[in-house]
Image (cartoon, rainbow, N blue to C red):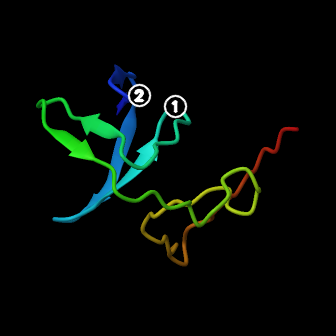
Amino acid sequence: RTVDAVDFERLYRVVNSTSTSVLLQSLDNDTPQVNDTFTNDDGQTFNINTVTSPTVDKYSGQLMFIDNKAGFTPSTDETVTLRTVIKF
């Protein structure tokens, strides 16, 4: 990321992209600003026009974990044991 001609090494994950926008996740808690310039690994540059705040506060504890796996239905001759460990 380049700010006022100063380069910063920041890491982002591309979550979603369209032909006109990109949704990024900061991997090092960086907050980009309007008019910053991003450069990808191929040397292409991108200017930031809009920065929007996230819709979920990741520190609130309201959203703890999402796991998108296929459901499991045991047959009548199977026994399922569930165990949970909670540490504080």
> Residue visible at 38% across and 29% down?
4
Up the image or down, 76 lies above or below 55; here it is: below
Q: Residues within 10 Å of mark 1 (few under 14, many from 20)?
A: few
Tell me, for residue 3, which label it has, or none.
none
Residue type highlighted by circle 2:
Arg
Q: What element carries label 2?
A: loop
Q: In this view, does 86 lie to the left or right of 74?
A: right
Q: Tell which of 46 and 14 is nearer to you.
A: 46
Position of residue 80 measured from the top left corner of the image (x, y, whole percent): 63, 63
Mark 1: which amino acid?
A: Asp
Q: Determine the residue positioned at 52% across, 72% down.
A: 74
The one of 76 and 59 positioned closer to us in this rendering: 59
Q: Residue at x 41, y 50 (%)?
A: 34
Q: Where is residue 64 in the image (x, y as percent from the top left)?
A: 68, 56
Name the side, left or right, on which 84 lies relative to 75. right
Task: Name the quarter where the C terminus is drawn.
Answer: top right
Secondary structure at badge 1 equals loop
Q: Pointer 2: residues within 10 angstroms few (<14), some, or many (20+)?
A: some
Hey, which quadrant is residue 49 in on the image? Answer: bottom left
Circles 1, 2 touching at the beta carbon (< 8 Å): yes
Picture coordinates of residue 20, whole percent (x, y): 21, 65
Query: Counting residues from the N terminus, which is met first, the one under dot 1 or under dot 2?
Result: 2
Residue at the outermost bottom position: 76
Quadrant containing the N terminus in the rendered view? top left
Q: Quadrant of residue 21?
A: bottom left
Nearer to us in this view, 48 or 15: 48
In three-dimensional space, the C-alpha distance between marks 1 and 2, rounded to whole angstroms, equals 7 Å
What is the x, y in percent for residue 26?
47, 41
**Residue underneath mark 2:** 10
Relative to 18, say whether 58 is above or below.
Answer: above
Total of numbered circles in the picture?
A: 2
Q: Name the residue under label 1.
A: 28
